[in-house]
Amino acid sequence: MAVYTDISEEELAAFLADYPVGELLSYKGIAEGVENSNYLLHTGEGHFILTLYEKRVNPDDLPFFVGLMEHLARNGVTCPQPVKRADGGAIGRLAGRPAAIVTFLDGMWPRRPTAAHCREVGAALAQMHLAGQDFAITRPNALGVSGWRPLFNLAADRADEVEPGLHAEVSGELDILEATWPSDLPSGVIHADLFPDNVFFLGKTLSGLIDFYFACNDLLAYDVAVCLNAWCFERDFSFNITKGQALLAGYQSVRHLSPDERDALPLLARGAALRFLLTRLYDWLNTPPGAVVTKKDPKEYLRRLRFHAQIRDAVEYGLEPA
Ligand SMILES: Nc1ncnc2c1ncn2[C@@H]1O[C@H](COP(=O)(O)OP(=O)(O)OP(=O)(O)O)[C@@H](O)[C@H]1O
Ligand SMILES: N[C@@H](CCO)C(=O)O
């Protein structure tokens, strides 16, 4: 999260009056993250997280996100819970933005993920996939394969400012991915952004998942591919096969990947790398001046993309032979 929208104590106290959180004692902006504005609230009832939904969140999708967090919690996935007003609603408006309060989740995200973390996150991802199977609301993936070219077009003219030749390289990747992207793999509710900063641990134990604001319906194995990108590369951009093995084994301890999903994994990982390259590229060129946010480097995902493009078999990620 980040802080794009400032709020005054008076308007926050007025907003909170409708929620059962008690009196506002203190609040502070959270500089971590890039998507929405977030504040840590300390109130008479404890700690809460206030989110003001910014650029990429469509207010029409908020019932999906709120309902999903409740559905997952009912089905054994620990995640923040929306705080409801007396009228039953969770979403309000604050400083001209849609806003909600969720419960505070104990734990810390791992700054240096180990293979043990990877195993746990793999298992938690698969649990989320199973728990989401009977969630009634659906939401298409706005950042799925059909959304990548329109997003690239918004930044294409300036892509070579970030890396000479980037425009041509991304155009070529889009051609390949659009032509070969699978459509007949198992699908369901995916998290779509399960990076280390969205997974909390208490000691060595995973304590919960946060940040469901990219969650949507898409290929389940694509979510695994997102996690391979986010968890299994070292700072020098080498792929750590021990972490890959742990993440995939953790996932398969709960849900088995089908032969078609296994075959598709290198392509899905390539697409996932492109998705984060594109949002980072757009943000790199368009982040508003004055926003409290640390921009993320698109080139980190160009390096990953090139790695995946030369993978021929998912065993190279550490997947056990079938
Ligand atoms: N329910 C919660 N309980 C405790 N801390 C939270 C909670 N939600 C968010 N945070 C804190 O806020 C930070 C940013 O949150 P989050 O990842 O949801 O933001 P974001 O802008 O959507 O970020 P990104 O999309 O870049 O991951 C987290 O790393 C964590 O420190
Ligand atoms: N997890 C994303 C940011 C939120 O979409 C990234 O690292 O680019």
Image: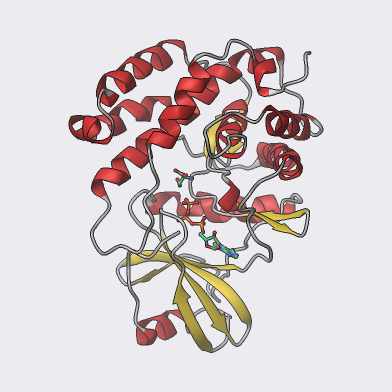
- The residue located at (66%, 17%) in the rendering is 316
Q: Is residue 131 visible?
A: no
Q: Quadrant of residue 185?
A: top right
Q: Which image quadrant: the C terminus?
A: top right
In depth, the one of 199 and 97 nearer the eye is 199
- The residue located at (58%, 69%) in the rendering is 83
In the rendered image, the vertical position of residue 287 relative to residue 24, given as above or below: above
In depth, the one of 78 and 189 nearer the eye is 78
Q: Position of residue 221 (x, y in %)?
A: 62, 26
In depth, the one of 195 and 306 nearer the eye is 306
Q: Is residue 228 visible?
A: yes
Q: Position of residue 312 (x, y in %)?
A: 59, 10
Q: Position of residue 271 (x, y in %)?
A: 47, 24
In the image, farthest residue toward the front: 236
Asked if residue 62 lies left or right of residue 279, the reply is: right
Q: Which image quadrant: the N terminus?
A: bottom left
In the rendered image, the vertical position of residue 119 relative to residue 107, given as above or below: above
In the rendered image, the vertical position of residue 51 relative to residue 193, given as above or below: below
Q: Quadrant of residue 255?
A: top right
